Each structure stands twice: as C-alpha cells, then as structure tokens.
Amino acid sequence: MMSRKLPASTVLVCRCKPLGARMRRREFITLLVGAAASPMAARAQQSAIPVIGFLNSSSRQLYHGEIEAFLKGLGESGFVDGQNVKIEYRWAEGHSDRLPTMVADLVAKKVAVIAATSAPAALAAKAGTTTVPIVFETGFDPVHIGLVANLHQPGGNVTGVTQMNALITSKRLELLQEFVPKMKLVAFLVNSRNPGLAEIQRNEAKAAADSLGVKIKFLDAGTEADLDEAFANLAAARADGLVIGSDGFFRGQSERLGELAARHSVPAAFETHAFVTSGGLLSYGGSSADSYRLAGVYVGRILKGERPADLPVQQGTKVELFVNAKAAKALGLNVPLPLSGRADEIIE
C-alpha cells in the first residue's frame, strides 16, 4: 500500500488533551471523591470508639475529685476520654426517680458499659438492663441490697466496688460518743425516698445505739426543704448528737449539712471531707477517690473484653477520719487524744 504524501503546507492538529491537563483532571476527581468519603470515614472512626455511660444520682459539681479519680483508673487501663473512648454523663441532681429514664436512654444509645456510681444509680441500672455490662460504686453491701449474689462470683452483667460506708454506721456512732461521753439520745438522718437503703441503715443504727446504751431518734429528709425541717425537729428533740446516713442525696448536700450542723450547734458525724470543712464535727468513711479509681480500672478491663461475671467485687480498704477541731471548740468539746493520733486530718 502506498503512503499518501501530504503537502508541505499541511498542519496536523491533534485533538487529544495534553498529558498535564489529563493528570490535573484525574487529581481533581480524586480530591472530590476523597472529600466526599472523608466525613464518612470520620463518622465510621467515631462510631468505632466505645461509649461509657456514667450514671449518678447527685450533681456533677459535687464530684470533681471522684470524676478525676475515675478517669485516672480508666487511664491505668489504657483509655483516655476523647481519644479512644467517650463518656456520656447522666446526673439525676438528687432526683432518683429520673434514673430509670436515664438508664433507658443509655441503653438505647448502645453504650459499651454503664458506670453506676451510687447505690440508687446501680439499682436502677440493674433493673434497666441484663445485657449491658454495669460497674457500680457504692457505700453499701452489694449483696445485701441485691446488686450481686456473691462478692467473689458476682455473675450476670454486674460487678463493681464498695466502700461499705453503710456498714460502718456503728463506728461513726462510737466516734461521736467519744466526743460526747454522756450522750443519751442520738438522732439518725435517713432518706426514705430510697426506702430499701433507708431500712437497712435504720436497722444497723438501732443495733449500734442499743449496744452503746443510747436511745435513737430517726429523722427523714429527701429534699433540700426537708433538711431544714429535719434540723428543726432535731433541736426540738434535744438530741445530744447526730449521725447522717449514707445516701447519694446527702453526699450531694455535704457542705449544706456541715453548715446546718454548725448553725444548730449539734455534734454531727457523716462520711465526707466536705462535711467537715463546712462546719461538721467529724467524718468517717471509705475513700471515694480510691473506689472511683478502682471502678475506672474495672470499666477499662471490661472494654478490653473481660466479663463482669468474672470480675469479683472489690472492697475499698482505705478508710479516712477527719476532725474539725474548730467546730469541737465552738461546741465546747475537746478532741479526744486517741482520735488526734488516728485522724487523717485535723482542721484547726
């Protein structure tokens, strides 16, 4: 076949796009696809981060130290909030009747584990789910209040940490009697809005008072308004001292309780450091910081795949005694010498 010879004046025109333009167009399309996919990738990555439901019957502003301790425990297990785990906080603000709805909300959000950090919160969580792992923190005997069947083999989806504060009610009464040796009548404050817990404490307080040869009068408070009425009744009863029961509502009112005890000039014992620094005479109870840290460790272990049924309930071993020497002086009392040596802190 003979090739056709083009005239010298003929110009060949190539309709193909330059290589550089084609490359730029390809890169542009790649960027568009990447931009569209990146939000989806971000959402996928975010959804892969486990979520912890943190449930408490009180108010957040009263638990800064405990939250810090909980986060520390999580960190010991390799988890950092906002990095490889997310925490959804739910605070009932002293209204325990809100807890079941909060539990249902956390379950609907498919949280990986619920940290129920008060007895009412733990009981509500257990009643609300049998599948989501629950780690509780409480001052009560978890077997006695029905959270677990056995401390060493909790079974089911529930385990946690106990300070056993409710079980040292008798010790608080003994300490108060050391300050007031001639005490004949002691008042005991409970929250009947948590009937099961209140009944346990009534029985223990009555037994402790009987063993010390002291009469006991029970007072009740479940709201801030109730506290004023309870202290008015305390003054009318002419009680020689006051022991405040272990309860999430009372913990949330620690500072106010200390102020009320000072205002009504009554020797009073509770379980929190804030109560003493606000005017209360003494506090005796398990270290909440220690138990919240342990709860954080357990949550981390469950996130790594361990089962609550295989994690024995831990019991906090650190018990703290705080004494307000200034409050004792205002009440006309002396700090007993044995208590001076045993106290973790004496506030002058």
Image (cartoon, rainbow, N blue to C red):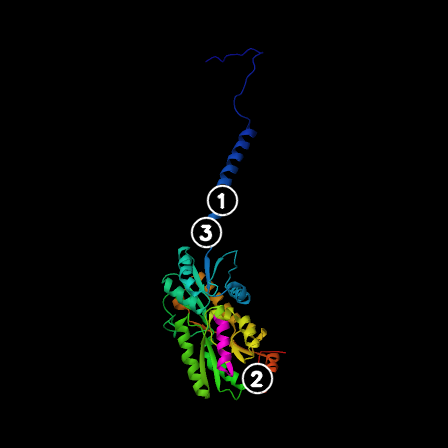
Rendered residue at 61%/81% (across/down):
330
Total tally of numbered discs in the picture: 3
Measured along the vertical axis of the image, is residue 239 above or below residue 78? below
Where residue 339 sits, quadrant-wise, is bottom right
Measured along the vertical axis of the image, is residue 211 above or below residue 151? below
How far apart are the two marked residues, 1 and 2, measured between alpha carbons? 62 Å
How far apart are the two marked residues, 3 and 1, measured between alpha carbons? 12 Å
Point out which mark residue 339 bears: 2
Q: Magenta stretch containing residue 234, yes or no?
A: yes
- Position of residue 21 in the picture relative to residue 119 (left or right): right
Q: Nearer the viewer, residue 286 or 346?
A: 346
Where residue 157 sits, quadrant-wise, is bottom left
Q: What are the residue bounds of the magenta stretch?
A: 226-241
Q: Which residue position holds label 3? A: 47
How far apart are the two marked residues, 3 and 2, measured between alpha carbons? 53 Å
- Circle nearer the viewer, 1 or 2: 2
Q: Identify the secondary structure beneath mark 2.
A: helix
Q: Identify the secondary structure beneath mark 3.
A: helix
Point out which mark residue 39 bears: 1
Q: Magenta stretch containing residue 259, yes or no?
A: no
- Circle nearer the viewer, 3 or 2: 2
Neighbours of disc 1 within 10 Å: few (<14), some (14-19), many (20+): few
Indicate the position of residue 130 as horizontal and vertical percent values.
36, 63
Rendered residue at 51%/79% (across/down):
235
Q: Which amino acid, by three-letter code, is at mark 3?
A: Ser
Q: Nearer the viewer, residue 166 or 158?
A: 166
